[in-house]
Amino acid sequence: MEALGLTADADARAIKRAYAVRLKTTRPDDDPAAFQQLHETYQAALAYAARTERADKDDADEARAGTQTAASTAEALRGDQALRNHAPRSLVAYIQDPALEAEIERWRDGTHVQNCAARILAAAQDMTDQSFSAWLSELPEWWSLELRPQIGHALAGLMKNRCIPITDATFDLLITSFADDPESDASHVLWSARLLGVALEQSPDSFEQWMQSYADTWSDYQRFMIGLHISHALGTQRPSLRLATIDTLMKAFGWQAQEDGDNLAWLHAARRTARKQELTLRRESALALDGDAEILTYELGAAGWDAMTPQWATALRSRLARPPSPWRSLATALLPARPSWMYRFCGIVQQWFPHQLPESVHAENLRFWTQIGNPQRPHGRQLGLALARGLCVAALLAIGASLLAVLSAVHPDTESATWAFLDIGWGLVGWIALVLVQMGAHWQARRLTPGTHKRTAHRWLLPAAMTAGIACTAGGWGNGVVGAAMGTALAHMAIYRVLGRMVPPPAVKAPQSLLISGMIGLASAAMGAILWPGLAVALILWLVSLVQDAQHDDLSILN
């Protein structure tokens, strides 16, 4: 009993368990003599326990039972001594327990180690730390010094290039039990699997703290081998990593300046992709109504808008993020500078999100401000905005004139302003005419797709306007200043049409057009030739534009 580490009152089950534990370290094929002595001790202990059990059952004759037990024990000891004096027999003869024989054969099976490693790995993921530690200590294979390294290599094969969700305590137990040699490949694979799991499951800040607590314990060789396994696992799985996580990995293993191999090349490409994703998320959060205005200001400044302030950024963002309302947007756009600001802001937002807008930005608001602020593409909303501005100014002037009329009625000494209403009306008519001419000039500067109805109307707009001017002159409406103004307007639109077809088109069209058309208008008014000089210039330039459309000549040298 002492040889098996048991007390004298141990039963047969305790003897078998103790024998199984020692059998794991005393194998028949490693040390036959030690195994023979262990087996003899096991047989003697079983005999002693059997006789002790029979003696306890005999309550009637305790003294006689004690005598028989002593005699049986002495006889068993004499039998054991006789066995020692006999010649050694074959090892198979000593294995008399079928359960032990089956266990030894099962351990010798090549698939047993793989199955055991799979069970250990499954238990490590499913159990708590304390439950797994208790379960592992009761596992017979855990006590075998021969099987532990084999199980460690099997675990490494199962965990290679995989992410294993286990706790740090469970991982430390696996390392100390099956990969206690820090220079072994099994240790490197287990470390890489755990590191990959932490990188994918935890936040970048938590992962950085984890790396700081564990990476300092590695040697240079460990760091190199673990990094090799990590790069191969990342190149094989290609998971989605955060930018800060990739930066932590690159800093820990010194990959910043290395791009050799497909794995590291993919990691650098993944970093660029993660940087774009982080930037996209940052901009999405800044464009939300409750987003950080400072971040939006910084991003707009990085896009080239240096004069931006947080207050302006908040105002611009609110016009895109609020619920769509065309009338409210039109009222907001009455101030002259707002459409150009919003058009620039919308252009930056479209550059940030070329494929899909964030949920905080309403596409209808973006479309409205893009249409109303694009100087290169005239739109009906631009015409409506310009007319609305004229009406607002006329309304304000009319209100002022009405107040003066009321004051003149109350106080006779006050000068009456009733004359202003007629001038306000003619001023509004002149404003509408200027808006229509400028919109027509911008439209003539565009190139439309051939074969469409808009292309036909676009080509024959100037001849139709010339015909209308001739009709007005014939009816007596185109005499003097009015005729000169009509000729100037026709020449202005024709100049825009020609300049818009130059390759490349001039960056600024208004100064050239206004200069030329203004000179034509002044000459017409001075000569009293009314409509005809401007009409002649417009007709010639219109014919030139037809040649441009047909032959795509480069007339930029005329600019």
Image (spheres, rainbow, N blue to C red):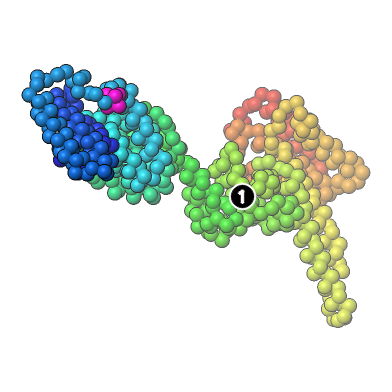
Dot 1 corresponds to which residue? 360
Q: Can you say which quadrant of the picture contains the N terminus? A: top left
- The residues colored magenta run 98-103
In the image, residue 117 lies at what x, y percent? 33, 31
Q: Can residue 250 be seen in this view?
A: no
Query: Is residue 137 inside the magenta stretch?
Result: no
Total numbered labels placed on residues in the image: 1
Res. 120 image quadrant:
top left
**Which is nearer the eye, 24 or 512?**
24
Around disc 1, counting alpha carbons within 10 Å, would you say few (fewer than 14), some (14 to 19), or many (20 or more)? some
In this image, 499 relative to 465: left or right? left
In the image, residue 301 lies at what x, y percent? 49, 52
Tell me the residue at 82%/65% (across/down).
Answer: 398
Q: Is residue 367 visible?
A: yes
- Identify whether 446 is placed above or below 36: below
Identity of the residue furthest to the left in this view: 85
Query: Is residue 102 inside the magenta stretch?
Result: yes
In this image, 60 relative to 426: left or right? left
Tell me the residue at 12%/34% (across/down).
Answer: 74
**Which is nearer the eye, 511 or 238?**
238
In the image, residue 281 lies at what x, y percent? 51, 46
- Identify whether 132 is placed above or below 310: above
Tell me the residue at 69%/57% (across/down).
Answer: 332
The amino acid type found where label 1 is placed reads Ser
Identity of the residue furthest to the right in this view: 475
**Which is nearer the eye, 416 or 162?**
162
In the image, residue 425 lies at what x, y percent? 84, 59
Magenta span main SS: helix
Label 1 element class = loop
Q: Can you say which quadrant of the picture contains the C terminus? A: top right
